[in-house]
Amino acid sequence: MATALDELLPQVVFIGGCTTGLFLTDDFTKEQVRYTDDVDLIVNVGSYFDWTQLSERLGQLGFRDSMEQEVICTKMLGPLKVDFMPDNADILGFSNRWYHDAMATARDFTLTEAITIKLVEPVYFVATKLEAYLGRGNGDALSSHDIEDLINIFDGRAEIVAEVNAVDGELRDFIRIQLQALLDDANFEYAVQSATGNNSARESLIFERIEACL
């Protein structure tokens, strides 16, 4: 999919469930990560006109509007669903409060010798997932893919504790408050049990890492 973006590739930032495995440093957790058939990308567009120009170029590159998807930012590349999400809520009427900063701080990530993508920093992956859960999770941690991705990060990336604790200000406060809210939710414990296959050692590790971020 990255190659299909052509000259647009350096202008988009990869985020969402499709990137979860890229953050993991634990081989066991990598094997457990769910497969997702959709790709989420953040794009910077200054106006709706810029959005229409981007959409036109994507069409030239083979991305098609989906007749089955209600979200205007969704394109199809063959069977693959790709969401191009503006970092500015004014463009399409929705966004994620952390997309702008996530895009501004994104780093290069080498997929292959020939392909390098822009990838959000792990701490912004956490923040965007927490924000997404607030917006669409309906308080149901057990069935939320956002929470599942979040659990995988705390399970499979030991570095996430230091990364979260290294930030401050509004970002730090938001992550701390939302993680505490999850710990106070009984359904979150069930979500952790489900994600780990009732592996008590990994459950303990996940809770230990989350609590270390408070």
Image: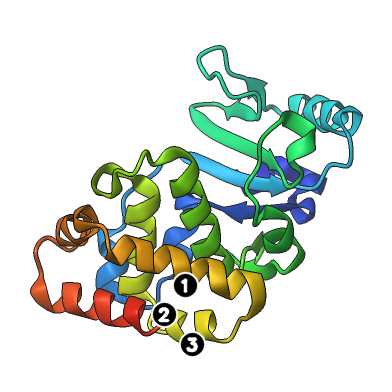
Q: Are marks 1 and 3 in contact (CB under 8 Å)?
A: no
Looking at the rendered image, the quarter that the C terminus falls into is bottom left
Q: Which mark is residue 214?
A: 2
Q: Is residue 196 left or right of residue 59?
A: left
- Position of residue 51 relative to residue 9, above or below, is above
Identity of the residue drawn at 61% across and 70% down: 171
According to the picture, the residue beneath numbered tag 1 turns out to be: 176
- Tell me how far mark 1 sits from mark 3, CA to CA: 13 Å
Q: Secondary structure at mark 3?
A: helix
CA neighbours of label 2 inside 10 A, class few (<14), some (14 to 19), many (20+): some
Q: Residues within 10 Å of mark 3 (few under 14, many from 20)?
A: few
The residue positioned 50% from the left and 14% from the top of the image is 68
Left or right? Give the position of 90 relative to 41. right
Q: Which mark is nearer the camera, 1 or 3?
A: 1
Front tag of 2 and 3: 2
Image quadrant in which you'd find residue 191:
bottom left
Q: Of callouts 1 and 3, which one flags the residue occurring earlier in the amino acid sequence?
A: 3
Q: Residue at x 39, y 42 (%)?
A: 137
The residue where tag 3 is placed is 162
Dot 2 falls on a residue whose secondary structure is loop
Q: What x and y, as percent, mark residue 167? A: 61, 81
